[in-house]
Each structure stands twice: as structure tokens, then as C-alpha cells.
Amino acid sequence: MRILFLTRSFNGLAQRLYLELTALGHEVAIEFDISDAVTTEAVALWRPALVVAPFLQRAIPEAVWRHTVCLVVHPGIVGDRGPSALDWAVAEGVCEWGVTVLQAEAEMDAGPVWASQNFAMREATKSSLYRQEVTEAAARAVVGAVQRFAATGAPPPAAGSGTPRGRWRPLMKQADRAIDWPHDDTRTVLRKIRAADGAPGVRDELFGLPCHLFDARALPPPPSAAHAPGQVVGRRQQAVLRATCDGLVAIGHVRRADGPEHFKLPATLAFLAETAALDDWPTSVADGTDPDIRLEAIGDGVLALHFDFYNGAVSTTQCQRLRNALRDVLARPPRVLVLFGGTDFWCNGIHLNVIEAAASPADESWRNINAIDDLTQTLIEATDCLVVAAMQGSAGAGGVFMALAADVVWARPGVVLNPHYKNMGNLYGSEYWTYLLPRRPGSPQPAEVMGRRLPLSAGQAQALGLVDEVFGDSPAAFRAEVLARARRLAADPDLPARLQAKRRQRLHDEALKPLAAYRDEELARMRRNFYGFDPSYHIARSNFVRRVAPSWTPRHLAIHRDPARQGASAAPATLDQDQDSGQA
């Protein structure tokens, strides 16, 4: 079928649903929800059998839903209505939640239910639940709803009155989220901030200035300290430490609200002058106190390195910290080193928000790309152990190629990869991709991967040679299977010969063309992106960081605006089609 996605943005959920439906043979065009007129025009051009709305913040125009079945993905259980479904579920600590696919009608969230999927809740941020449980449930529910539409054209009968149902809940306002520091215990503070993580954050104050709080973690208080609830008592890495009535929380990210130009930043960077004088709580990967990097001794010659950076972005400083941890591990290498990355994202490359906040974004871009290149080089040159990239979370841009620096790449089925840079203002990219991509067995020509601006499922990435194996029914099952496979690799009597072959190959590659040459060539192109006359990268980065609403849908997504595809059904896009005119 022809399906039109109507969405506020091509976010992770929309990407996953796009991959699921195109894998089933459907033709999916995408239109950003910019205005009723644009939506109506898109439907007229594409003439879809079905409209799917993965991520909306406005009602679909009546002129559309009156004449075309429109299925809305609602992150709530059957009967739940309102714009803050997941926020309320996290804030209230419910044990089970779900996703409902319902038909758009005049009354919001009240149309016929086409499919639903429930899931167990875990103690996590709203954004993490959205990326994992909500996305998995939505994928199953949307595929089921689309299959039912194709088969019957009608939703299933309404569930009986005995079925547990949700209720109407209003927009969660900042008054509902407010932290009562003298009386809210640590668990309550965490739940309030987690329910607002991603957006909009919890409105509060730090150092007497208004801001929104994100990314909170509980910490044990110092044994002899007595601090008033709400008091800022120190800093740890990029987080500020704040007392609660029964403990301590580390607030990792904030968005200041004392001016129009503020965006989300690490807390110590957002309040640079104010936090400079705070007591610095030392951290160490070795003793397990580092908030982002964790070593896990598996035994049997296997070591796991977890690096769970907020939203998957790695700043210059974070790259340096991770490289230092990696070099310490490689000084006494295990037989097998497993790189788990983070649970939501394996890695997404350079930290655009930190870059945007710098006095010179061009200079900070240059420092950040060199730092992640240093990190990737350390992985490439790790020839005394077998390195496994275990992608339990999705990855983008430089994060994909950092994973390809490993000897073996495994991914779970729900992972989405975006191994391209061009959407960020035509960035050329680095992280040694010009060396790493061609050496992957069976991979296509680099231009076919780098010129494509659409996401790849884990299965597609495997077919292209970017991933070696895809497995695991759940994140927990994936991690368990990764460790079992890593143990088998470590116990393999052929491992010494494999490592010897790896060292020979590295020496051969270096003699043929040094890594420094690949890096110099890539960075010469990146220097033009950062310092050249074309401001596309700087404009795209600023718009991304500030969440500037798009004024049009990129043409590689809006295929219904291609005159050649508006008539009879056209073949889906293939890897060798670059369907964009060059704009980010």
C-alpha cells in the first residue's frame, strides 16, 4: 500500500515504523506536520490508502481524516486520552503501560482502536521508555493495525467493559511537576524529573536563576554532611549535586530559562561561573564512581566496557575520558573486550549542543572531531585483544563508524543505524570511515552508504556488511547472548592465531596507506565544513540544537513531492539513489 506518515519530525519512533513498514513492501512517504494546508496537499499528491501519525502534537485536519483512514500512535493504554500520557505514567509509578493505535476522529484520542500493546514499566526516564518499550510496542501494534487494514478495512470490535482502560488526563503542567525540595524524598524528585526528561524538563531554580532540570540520578549523601534540602552541595563531572530531604541527586543537564537563546546543556557548562567554586567530587572508572563509563569484569578472559552518555552524544572531554579508560584496559588487555555503549544509544558522535555553546563553535567542532578520531584510532590499533561492538542501542553518524572499528559488530533487531552525516549540513564525516567502511566484508561502495540519507534497520545493516550478526528478543536477552558468545570467543583455541592475523593485517594496511593519511584527508574536508564559506553545517546544527520547527519536509523523505512518483506506484528507493538536492 501507499502510506503517508504525518509526523512532527522523523524521530526514532518514526524511523523504526518506517523501516518496519517498508520491509513489508509498503511505500511510505513522509510529511512533517507543518500546517493543515501542507498536510492536505500531501494527501492529494500521494493519494495514500492509509495515513499513519507516529508523533503528533496537533490534531489531523478534518478534511483528511473524513476521507482517509488515519491511524494515530498514542503512547498510552486503551482508553487513555490526553497529550501527557507517558508523563503521567512515569510520575505516578504505574507498573504497566502500553501503546494504542487508534483512528483519528473529531474527539482527540477517542476513535476506534485498531491495535494495542502493553508492556511492563521500569524505573527509567520518559525518554528512555519511549525509545525502548514504547517503540517496541508501537512497532508491533502498527504492523498489526496496518495488516488488519489491508485484510479487512475495519478495526476489531471494541473490547468488553471488563478490560482495564485508561482515562482522560490533561496536559501535565509545570505546577504538576514542581519539586517540593523540603518535603519530596529522593525517589519523588527522581520520578518528577524522569517524567519530564527529554521535554519539557522540570521548571526550577539553580543559583537563583530559572532553569529546567533533566537527567537526574540518585547518589548516597556524604556520611557526615548535613545539607538543607534543595541546597547545591558540589559537582561531579558535568552534573551538579543537590540535597533532598533524605539523600542526594546529581542533575546532569539543564536548560536555563533566563533568556530566549538557551538550550539543553550539561549542568556545569550551563552554569559555568556558578559551578566553578563548588566542591568537585572525584570520580574514577576503576572504582566504579564514573557516572558514564563502567567496566564489568565478566571472567573467562572477557571484559565489558559500558559508556552511556546522555542522548548518545560525546563531547571532547567525554571522548578523552573514554579513550583514557580504553587505554587503561588495553594496557593489560583481556582476551575479548565487549563495547556495550549505552542502553538507548550505542553512540551518536560529536556533541552538537556543547559545540553550539562554545565561544567558537568552529573551533570546538574541530576539537571534538579530533577527540573522537583519537578514540576511534585507539580501537583500530587495539591488536592484542578481540574487540566486539555490541549495539544494544541505536547509533548515528560517527558512532556507527566507531563501532566499525571493532573486529566484530553485533546488534539487536530493534537497533536503527544512521551511518551518514549529510543531514547535518552536508558534513563529510571522519572517524576513519574512509578506511573502515571499505574493509567490511561484503559492504557496498562507500558512496552508496554515505549518500543515503535514510535510516537502516539492523537487518539491512547486516545485509550491507555493516553488522555481522543480529540477535536477541529483548535488550536483556541480547546482553546475555553477547556475553555467552564473548566467552566462547575467548575460549576458542584459534583466538591467538586470529589475533596474530589481525596484527599482520594492521601492519599491511598501515604500509599500504597510513591511518594518518585517511585522517588528514577526512579532516581536510571537515575543515571546510567548519571554517569554509558554506554555513550549512552551522545553520543545521543551530536549528537542531534549538529545536527549530522545520518549514518544509526534506525531499528524500517527501517522495510524494517527486513528480515521477505521484502517478502510478513507483519502486521503493534503493541504496544508490540520493534523493536530496543537498539541503540538510
Image (cartoon, rainbow, N blue to C red):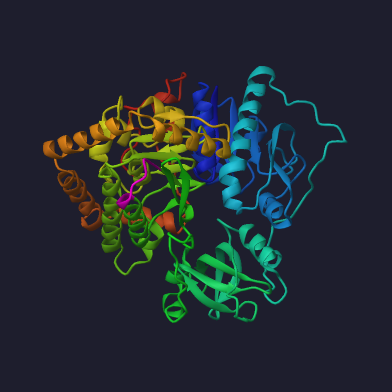
Where residue 430 appears, x then y in whole percent?
Answer: 26, 46
**Residue 210, quarter of the rendered image:** bottom right
Q: How many marks?
A: 0
The answer to whether residue 560 shows anywhere in this view is no
Magenta stretch: give its range.
330-337
**Residue 249, quarter of the rendered image:** bottom right
The answer to whether residue 367 shows anywhere in this view is yes
Residue at the (66%, 60%) spot, across then down: 191
Seen from the viewer's position, the closer of residues 259 and 479 is 479
Q: Is residue 458 above or below residue 424?
A: above
Image quadrant in which the N terminus is located: top right
Where residue 498 appears, x then y in whole percent?
Answer: 29, 31
- Residue 332 highlighted magenta (yes or no): yes
**Residue 36, quarter of the rendered image:** top right
Q: Is residue 40 above or below residue 324?
A: above
Seen from the viewer's position, the closer of residues 295 and 200 is 295
- Residue 80 highlighted magenta (yes or no): no
Residue at the (51%, 66%) spot, across then down: 254
Residue at the (31%, 70%) spot, across then down: 359
